[in-house]
Image (cartoon, helix red, strand yellow):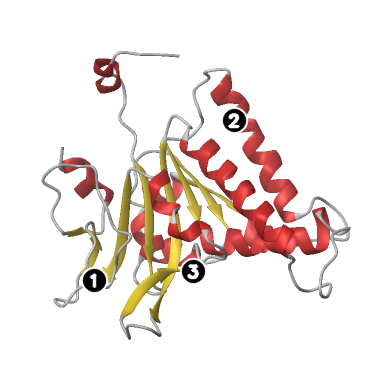
Amino acid sequence: MSIKLSELTQGPSHAKVLLLGPSGAGKTVAAATFPGKKLWLDFDNKISSAANFYSQDKVMLESIEVKQYGKMSIKPATGKPRIAQFQEDMAVYFKMHDAKQKLPFDTLILDTITTLSDSLLEDYRYVSQTGVKRPNVDQNSQSDYGLFATHFKQIIGRLLALECNVLFVGHTQMEQDEATGLRTNEILMPGQLKAKLGIYFEEVYFAKINQKGERVWQTQADGKTTFCRTQRRNMPIEITANYAEIVRVR
């Protein structure tokens, strides 16, 4: 399929954002500022922080539908395993997308890539890949990690293709390079995919509290945070942790 470049400037513009940061940086609360009806895929079990923060904002609370995958069992005695339920739920929206039907939400939030990664690897150990030879039953094999990279890229691709805003949230931690002694913020997820994760997203921000005590998103890389990037011209190095700041810059 081919189109004119001018066609990409027509119709709705959707933000495809990867928001990374340490625990306590306000990622979940800020994620709720994304517009319209929101479908929240909660693997982290911390959506209550947003519910508490917006407890007096009935419009905000009613705009969010939450699927609490983090509260489901990886291998339940009855019902579907966590990842199988996630895949079944997403298949409904992929089918709507393929049929060019309007989705029942304006923004999709996956919270977080870190805990989704853990869930996928647990699923391989205890549910979907139980025949694979492993050092022990509770340890993933090399083939699991190969499958994980392929599976995760498929999930990213399908969700980012949806006609809506898409926000992936992920955890980071400070790590020190043994050779250089430099300390940098690194994405908390397994395997080599984390080094390439940013290429799938238009915008990659780092959530932090700046020297003024303000919750902000860093939009450009520096020596400590190398994964930040933006495709929006004139985007400041730091913006207030709010969706409105993304669309304000064109």
| Residues under numbered marks 3 and 2 in contact, where contact means CB atoms less than 8 Å apart | no
Mark 2 surroundings: few (<14), some (14-19) or many (≥20) residues within 10 A: some
Picture disc at residue 188: 3
Q: Residue at the spot x=27%, y=73% of the render? A: 224
Mark 1 or mark 3, whichever is nearer to me: 1
Quarter of the image containing the N terminus?
top left
Task: Name the amino acid type tagged 1.
Answer: Gly
Mark 3 or mark 2, whichever is nearer to me: 3
Q: Nearer the viewer, residue 218 or 74?
A: 218
Residue 72 in view:
no
Distance from disc 1 to disc 2, alpha carbons, whole Å, reads 39 Å
Q: Which of the two labelled residues, at mark 3 and mark 2, occupies the earlier sequence position? A: 2
Quick one: SS at disc 1? loop
Q: In this view, does 130 lie above or below 233?
A: below
Q: Nearer the viewer, residue 161 or 96?
A: 161
Quick one: SS at disc 3? loop
Picture coordinates of residue 131, whole percent (x, y): 89, 58
Q: Which of the two labelled residues, at mark 1 and mark 2, occupies the earlier sequence position? A: 2
Task: Name the amino acid type tagged 3.
Answer: Leu
Q: Is residue 87 above or below residue 7?
A: below
Picture coordinates of residue 167, whole percent (x, y): 41, 48
Q: Is residue 224 above or below residue 74?
A: below
Residue 8 in view:
yes
Say whether residue 15 is left or right of residue 197: left
Mark 1 surroundings: few (<14), some (14-19) or many (≥20) residues within 10 A: few
Q: Residue at the spot x=20%, y=59% of the render? A: 240
Task: Name the amino acid type tagged 2.
Answer: Phe
Mark 1 or mark 2, whichever is nearer to me: 1
Picture disc at residue 94: 2
